[in-house]
Image (spheres, rainbow, N blue to C red):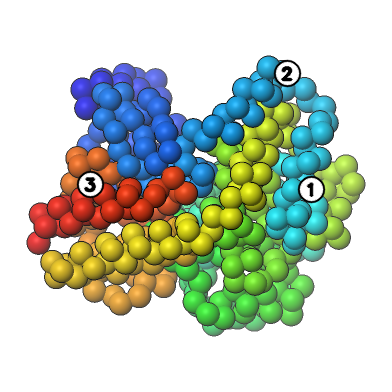
Amino acid sequence: MQKSQQLFERAQQHIPGGVNSPVRAFKAVGGTPPFIERADGPYIFDADGKQYIDYVQSWGPMVLGHNHSGIRQAVVAAAEKGLSFGAPTEAEVIMAEMVSDMVPSMEMVRMVNSGTEATMSAIRLARGYTGKNKLLKFEGCYHGHADSLLVKAGSGALTLGVPSSPGVPDDIAKHTLTQEYNNLDSVKDAFNEHGDDIACVIVEPVAGNMNCIPPVEGFLEGLRALCDQYGAVLIFDEVMTGFRVAQGGAQARYNIQPDLTCLGKVIGGGMPVGAFGGKREIMSHIAPSGPVYQAGTLSGNPVAMAAGLAALTAIRDANMYDTLSSNTERLALGIKAIADKYDIPLTVNYAGSMFGFFFTDVEKVVNYQQAINCDTDRFNRFYHGMLEQGVYLAPASYEAGFVSIAHTDDVITETLSIVDKVMATLV
Ligand code: PMP
């Protein structure tokens, strides 16, 4: 850790908290974050040369594993032709066609540079399209750091104890309604009270920012029906779940058609890319077809498009989702079995290649309150035990874990033997 320690001290001189995104600072679990030098397949390697099996996977994009050769070669080839043109390219056309083909509800697609931009723009579009002001989101869901969405948010905002951030004026926050995830009755109540002014419901169809919480049966279907009843736009934030819980995302897995979808992470193959899209009728309100303004100097960047197209092509050709799901299930159930063996209260959730584990007595965690009432002290001890033994998990108990296709049976077996060793120390 010597080099990481030195880098972390240097970083704090000129970068707030020493990091460019808060969770990376290890505030929740304490200690020094390893500074990463390179990555390959299921592994990352830190500045001191230590290898870790990585279940963060750059927070989700690396569904094919790190440093995939097809993506790397596509990036190099695109870079040789120029880094940015600020003018349309064929790669953007192919990208839009490919996204529409793989996620059919996205009849039209606009590329952006991050998940935050995708959700922020989708919400503006929903408001512009409906002429209504309010948005409804769920406690513990994170949709990026736009003002309207930093109200009772998950992920780092939750970890750092600022789910509703200072700097968001009350006049903006008052238009954000926040209900309990997986509780349809609370959504019905909100529609009863504010139905005339709700422009959209935005939801993580599998929540991944308060650990991993899949939707209970009927929840997503109920949101679809309420949005139809009240003329609100249903937005699936599939920044995390897109191309991950199934090739067509959560909407394919649970067979629900949202009006708009936000994508990020996987769609860029590791480059800074996001997208939003959906029904032609709604998307045609975006500038320059319509009056709702949205733009980006680097949007559809040729190098980023090359990475994304290579990632989506490899995904489409790999037929990998059954393997991903069964490997993830084996990992999650394996963690649970080891905890049971040591009489440590723990429950697991998983969907596709997302997973989460909770140190709690609760049999099945389905909402935010249950997620935050877990034994964080035990999580932190587990975390550092795993890190020490060479397994890199998300450094906070409110984040989902990710499995890639490079996490083979052998890698999962090795991980479980380390879990066993570390759980034995927690009794
Ligand atoms: N939506 C979801 C569901 C996310 O998980 C994230 C990031 N973790 C975002 C939006 C924001 O994406 P970005 O960090 O690329 O802005």
Separation (CA) of disc 1 from disc 3: 42 Å
Q: Is residue 288 toward the left or the right of residue 194 in the image? A: right
Task: Tell me what residue is drawn at x 26 percent, y 67 percent.
Answer: 336
Helix, strand or loop under label 1: helix
Residue 251 visible to the viewer: yes
- Does residue 169 lie above or below 75 as drawn? below
Disc 3 residue type (three-letter): Met
Does label 3 or label 2 sit earlier along the sequence?
A: 2
Between disc 3 and disc 2, the foreground one is 2
Disc 2 crowd, CA 10 A, few/some/many (<14, 14-19, 20+) = few
Q: In this image, 369 relative to 420: left or right?
A: right
Give 58 or 186, whichever is nearer the viewer. Answer: 58
Residue 202 place in picture, x, y as percent: 62, 62
Q: Residue at x 72, y 22 (%)?
A: 84
Front residue (pair 200, 412): 412
**Tag 3, which secondary structure?**
helix
Check disc 2 and report the residue beneath it.
81
- What residue is pinned by disc 1? 97
Whether residue 126 is visible:
no
Label 2 amino acid? Lys
Residue 252 percent location from the top left of the image: 64, 66
Residue 154: % across, % down: 45, 55
Q: Which mark is residue 386?
A: 3
Q: CA distance from mark 3 to mark 2?
A: 43 Å
Q: Is residue 326 left or right of residue 425?
A: right
Mark 1 Cα shell of 10 Å, populated few (<14), some (14-19), many (≥20)? some
- x, y (%) of residue 309? 68, 39
Marks 1,3: beta carbons within 8 A: no
Compared with residue 153, is residue 110 higher up or lower down, i.e. above or below?
Answer: above
Q: Which quadrant of the figure contains the C terminus?
A: bottom left
Label 3 close to label 2 by CB (< 8 Å) = no
